Image (tube, grey):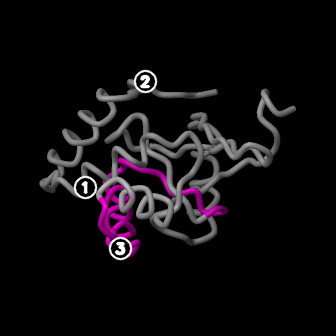
Amino acid sequence: MNAHAHTEHAGESLVDAARSALEAKGERWTGMRSEVFEELARHQSPASAYDIADNLSARRGSRVAPNSVYRILDLFVRNNLANRIESANAFLANTHPGCRHDCIFLICDDCGTASHLDDDTLTGALRQAGRKAGFSDVRPVVELRGLCANCA
């Protein structure tokens, strides 16, 4: 597997890295963006905008609109702070914010946990195949579904 070096973050380190990466792109780290990212980072399995909005609403004691959460999540995806799990219409916090590469997601069909692995050789071959087929700005989306080691 051809992987590049990056630092995996967790907890407060992850939030700090996300804030730094977003601000480095010229975006503001607002209170609401912070709350959405912290809620997203709590999840080990992909979380929907509705899950996040419901949890934030309960914590705040006032309704948080899922559309607002979607806009923030889209901003996070564009700036590589979060990844979208296409098959679940859900999101995961990127544990190495600001590091641009293509992840291969492993999603457990039983417990729903998701992890990723990096294989730049495989995703590079997919990019090259897309370019050969006449596509530009190719972005591989690779999701493998099965059972994790705990559920197998």
Name the disc covering residue 5, or none. 2
- Amino acid type, residue under disc 2 in the picture: Ala
Query: Is residue 114 placed above or below 1 in the rendered structure?
Result: below
Between marks 2 and 3 in the image, the one whose residue lies nearer the viewer: 3
Question: Which quarter of the image is occupied by the C terminus?
Answer: top right
Q: Which badge, 2 or 1, is on the more N-terminal residue?
A: 2
Residue 140: which quarter of the image?
Answer: bottom right
Residue 97: which quarter of the image?
Answer: top left
Q: Which badge, 1 or 3, is on the more N-terminal residue?
A: 1
Disc 2 packing (10 Å; few <14; some 14–19; many ≥20): few
Residue at the disc numbered 3: 65
Question: Which quarter of the image is occupied by the N terminus?
Answer: top right
Residue at the disc numbered 1: 33
Is 2 placed left or right of 21 in the picture?
Answer: right
- Amino acid type, residue under disc 3 in the picture: Ala
Q: Which residues are the magenta region?
A: 61-88
Q: Residue at x 53, y 28 (%)?
A: 3
